[in-house]
Image (spheres, rainbow, N blue to C red):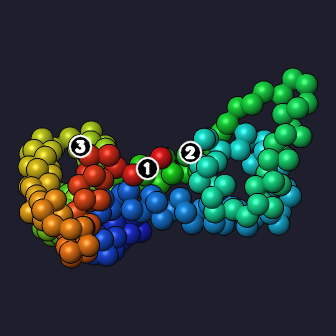
Amino acid sequence: MTEYEQRILKQMEQSLYCPVCSLLEEEEFSMMANLQYDVTHRPELRETVTEEGGFRDYHFRQFRKIASAKTNVLVLMAMIARYVQPGKQFVVHCRFCGHLDTYQGRLIEAISFMLMENSFRTSYTDHRGMCKRQLESVEAGLSDEPTRGWLKEVHRDQMLKEIPYVELVATKSYYDTCGFARGSVYRTTEKFLGRRG
């Protein structure tokens, strides 16, 4: 079993949210937390980030939220110093996007492979599954038409499982419902939209 397969199974045991989105969020936060420390204490890395153009807008905003004011100022000062030079263009090669795209691709590959195993199919059926966006990525990589059909059917069934919980939240006070029912609002929203960013 690959490292990515292990991560997916562990995530599915811990949470009913889309395992790919959840793992991407964890990876993104971990990467940001490490980078914000490193750019503060390692000027050469700060220079590399500046040469890359910083981060795309979403990741810049996320980075700004978790990094200290000092770290944000150090990065911004380095970027200003670089881009006020004549002839320098502002082109962003966001290291977060590049890394996360690769990571997502590996997770999608792992799920595609795992779907060929009956034991994983059972676990996946009992879970709440993936969001629409990740599901479409997995489907695009599947050459086996029966597996694609099965995956679509399971996705519909997983969404139908949320209806009683969503209805419960709609008919009672949000705080009078159990945490699992309240979570249905987030799980269902995620099913349609996937992760932020």
Q: Between residues 2 and 25, which one lies in front from this camera angle?
A: 25
Q: Is residue 53 left or right of residue 28?
A: right
- Labels 1 and 3: the sequence-earlier one: 3
Q: Which residue is mark 3?
A: 139
Residue sticking out furthest to the front: 173
Query: Which element is circle 1 on?
Result: loop
Toward which corner of the image does residue 125 lie, by quadrant? bottom left
- Give the number of the mark in front: 3 or 2: 2
Residue depicted at 64% across the width and 48% down the height? 60
Residue 58 is marked as 2
- Give the number of the mark in front: 1 or 3: 1
Residue 196 is marked as 1
Residue depicted at 28% across the width and 52% down the height? 189
Residue 159 in the image: state x and y as whole percent. 14, 54
- Labels 1 and 2: the sequence-earlier one: 2
Q: Between residues 62 and 110, which one lies in front from this camera angle?
A: 62
- Residue 91 seen in this snapshot: yes
- Residue 127 seen in this snapshot: no
Amino acid of disc 3: Glu
Residue depicted at 81% across the width and 42% down the height? 79
Q: Residues within 10 Å of mark 3 (few under 14, many from 20)?
A: some
Q: Do residues under tags 1 and 2 come within 8 Å of each other at their CB atoms?
A: yes
Reply above or below: 116 against 34: above
Residue depicted at 36% across the width and 57% down the height? 20
Residue 63 in the image: state x and y as whole percent. 64, 55
Q: Residues within 10 Å of mark 1 (few under 14, many from 20)?
A: few
Residue at mark 1 to residue at mark 2: CA–CA distance: 9 Å
Toward which corner of the image does residue 72 lie, by quadrant? bottom right
